[in-house]
Image (tube, rainbow, N blue to C red):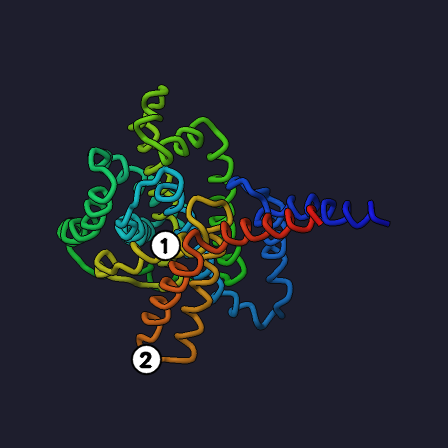
Amino acid sequence: MTIEKEQTPKRNNQFLSYFGIFRRSHNASLLVTVILFIVAILFPLSFGPHDQTALAQYGIYLMWITLAESWNLIGGYANLINLGMGAFFGTGIVLTSIFMFAGLSFPIAMLLSGFAGSGLALLLTPTFRLRSDYFAIGSLVIPFILRPIVEYLAGKTSFDLPTGTSFNPTQFYYLGLAMTGAAIFGIFWLMRSRVGIALRSIGDDEVAAAATGVNVLQSKMIALMISGFIASVAGAYYLGILGAANTGIFDDLTYSLFPAFMVVIGGIGTFEGPIVGALLFSAVSYGTVIYFQGTSFEVPVFSAMIMVVAVLLPRGIIPTLRRNWHRFSRRNIKK
């Protein structure tokens, strides 16, 4: 009987260690995420044929998760605090509208906008000479610089979808799910490649990484290009949700700062962090909009969330759960 009491907690610990949030490693397993993704695929089946339009409200969750994943790649793993995500996000909106008016389908327009976002990232590689806080400040002004350029070249400030454009709610939901899944699992495998290992080493100590032969500039450039691609595709999808947007979105710090907040809340540099942070952030946003319509009550709510996390969970939700679980499991094993 004594032996069984000592071994049971250990077996439970080994079983639960397969679930990402309980693993000590930042490279968590895919099990929980894959299960949730399968649930998300089957989710539309719970809606009746006349309730499919309700799926549209879930597109905003998919957009935020994708945008948070984009930020985590460059800010969480490579430790480059990019506060200019709005530049890529706005680029996706603007170019998707232009491509669709040129006669391209929405998925193709999204894809091309993503490549344009990668091109914009390539143009911004000189900013890598800026370090730490200076890079953050430099990236923050990029959307503000880009707005007048876009307005001058396009000759207008409003961008929308062609008249008569409509989406099947279920198909649009699955398109967003494919976008989000590609971002989540694509980054997961990227971080296990040579590029991912290089990014982690740069994030830990850039000087030491360069001394060991890591091509710092090339690794940062690849990360920013992939991040820009993902953020631009998220912007394109958001245009599909809104139907129309204007260039004021470049000046809206929501799309530059909120992805960073989401990742910090969930756990910066972790696999699950962007997903948890984005879902929590989106749920709170949706709730405040529903219950406090016509107000900006979400701003103090978000501020309170960030302060609570900063004080009580400085490492974010996921790392705190991991740490507390391992403390609990070690205590049980000793018993």
Indicate whether 271 appears above or below 306.
Answer: above
Outermost residue to the right:
1
Give percent across and percent down for residue 66: 43, 51
Q: Is residue 49 above or below residue 9?
A: below
How much space separates mark 1 and mark 2, taking CA atoms? 24 Å
Frontmost of labels 1 and 2 is: 1
Q: How many marks?
A: 2
Residue at 64 percent across and 45 percent down: it is 17
Q: Give the crowd class for mark 1: few <14, some 14-19, many >=20 residues within 10 Å.
A: many
Left or right, residue 71 beside residue 2? left
329 or 74: nearer the viewer? 329
Crowding around mark 2 (Cα neighbors within 10 Å: few <14, some 14 to 19, many 20+) is few
Residue at 46 percent of width and 40 percent of height: 187
Side of 173 where 220 appears, left or right: left
Residue 32: mark: none
Corner quadrant of residue 261: bottom left
Q: Residue under circle 2?
A: 294
- Is residue 47 shown left or right of residue 255? right
Pointer 1 or 2: first along the chain = 1
Q: Nearer the viewer, residue 177 or 263?
A: 263
Which x, y percent locates residue 145?
Answer: 15, 49
Q: Secondary structure at mark 1?
A: helix
Name the amino acid, label 1. Answer: Pro
For residue 118, say whether it is visible: yes
Residue occupied by mark 1:
259
Tag 2: residue type? Gly
Q: Quadrant of residue 63?
A: bottom left
Q: Please give the name of the residue rendered at 30% of the width and 50% of the height, measured from the top-left corner.
A: 85
